Structure formats: C-alpha cells, structure tokens
Image (cartoon, rainbow, N blue to C red):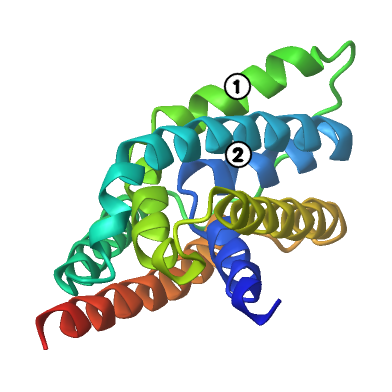
Amino acid sequence: MSDFFPAIPIGILLSFTIGPVFFTVLETSVSKGIKAAIFVDLGVAISDIVFFTIAYLSTNSLLSSIQENPAWYLLGGVLLSFYAGISLINIKTEKDTTAKFQSDKQENLNFFALAIKGFLLNIINFSVLFFWVGVIIVFGPKFEMSQYKIIVFFSLILLTYLLVDLCKIYLAQQLKSRLTKGVIKKIKLGVNFFILICGVFLIVKGIV
C-alpha cells in the first residue's frame, strides 16, 4: 500500500499546477457557484483520463526497458521539468494580478456546457500529456508494469485532485473578498518551482 502513497502528493500538486484551469475553477466558483465549478472540474477530470490513456498506450511498450536503463529517469525528469517550465512561463506572463474576482448571479446555467468548457480548457493544454507520460515512466517500473496497479495509482491521483479541488472551490466562496489573481499566482509559482526541482532531481538520477 505504501507504493501508492506518492499518488497523494502528486494529486495535490496536479490540483495547483494545471495552468488556466486553476484560475477558471476558482473564478467559476465565485461567479457562478460551487455546483457550476464542480461541473467544470469534472470536465477537466475527464480530459485527464483521456490524456492518461494516451500516455499509457504510448509508453506501455517502452516500460519493460526502463528498469534496465536509468536513462529513462532522465526522460521523465525532462518531461516534468518541461511541464513546470511551460507553467512558469504562462504564470509569469499573466497580467492584472491585483484584480479581485467579481461575483455575478447567473441563472439557468448549462452544467453540461460547463463540463465541456473544463474538458476543452485542459485538453488544449498539451503539456499535461507530458506530465502523465512522465508519471508513467517514473512510477510504472515500481509497479512491475502491472496495468491494474498503474490504473489504481492514477485513480488515487485523480481522486486526490478532485478532493483538493472541492476544498479550493469551497474556500474560493469563503474567501472571495480577499482572493486576488496575485495570491493565486504566488501559490502556482511555488508549486511549479517544486515540480521543477523534482524534474531536475530525476535528470541528475538518470545521468549519474
């Protein structure tokens, strides 16, 4: 069971490093309500399932050689660093960080459309695919390439992500008078720097 424990911190990190989705979920919670934000999040989760499936199918044939070749850790580190780097660049280019969220009452919300919005918003962020490929390459060998264990690991990541996002959605409602884009930017910068450090560590592990 301890082998699955890393899924929890990965799920937490994913919740704070998903790029434009992070801002959109919080904004939806404040402007349209908790239920609307949950549907956006469900759309994001579905797109993550799609990305994970693509990543798994594209890397499964390579996993058998990873244990014998530490250079794969180098690839995993590069992919994670690439993901963090893209996120940091996007964060740095954000503007209007002092503005607060504005609350607007919306009637007759189309929750299906909100789920589609979340799905599309995440699916166009192609760096998320690199993230999942990196996760599979790094953790796949630890589960001896077991499809069942890898799927359980991914499910725990996704479940953790959704639980953390529920907390974010709730807190956004409670703290909307103080929540600014600047605060969000600082949180995202810190978490992405941490992922970058993890990526560099894997690169060093693959080289040494």
Image location of residue 116, percent across then percent down: 63, 18
The numbered disc on residue 117 is: 1
Q: What amino acid is found at the position of numbered circle 1 in the picture?
A: Lys
Vertically, is 40 above or below 59? above
Q: Residue at x 41, y 32 (%)?
A: 54
Q: Residue at x 46, y 35 (%)?
A: 51
Q: Quadrant of the N terminus?
A: bottom right
Marks 2/1 in contact by CB < 8 Å: the verdict is yes
Nearer the observer: mark 2 or 1; the answer is 1
Q: Which residue is mark 2?
A: 24
Image location of residue 108, percent across then percent down: 89, 10
206 left or right of 56? Answer: left
* Residue situated in front as seen by the camera: 82 or 187: 82
Q: What amino acid is found at the position of numbered circle 2 in the picture?
A: Thr
Rounded to the nearest angstrom, the CA distance separating label 2 from label 1 is 10 Å
Question: Is disc 1 surrounded by few (<14), some (14 to 19) or many (20+) residues within 10 Å?
Answer: some
Tell me the quarter of the picture where residue 181 sits: bottom right
7 left or right of 74? Answer: right
Image location of residue 155, percent across then percent down: 67, 51
Image location of residue 50, percent across then percent down: 51, 30
Q: Is residue 112 visible?
A: yes
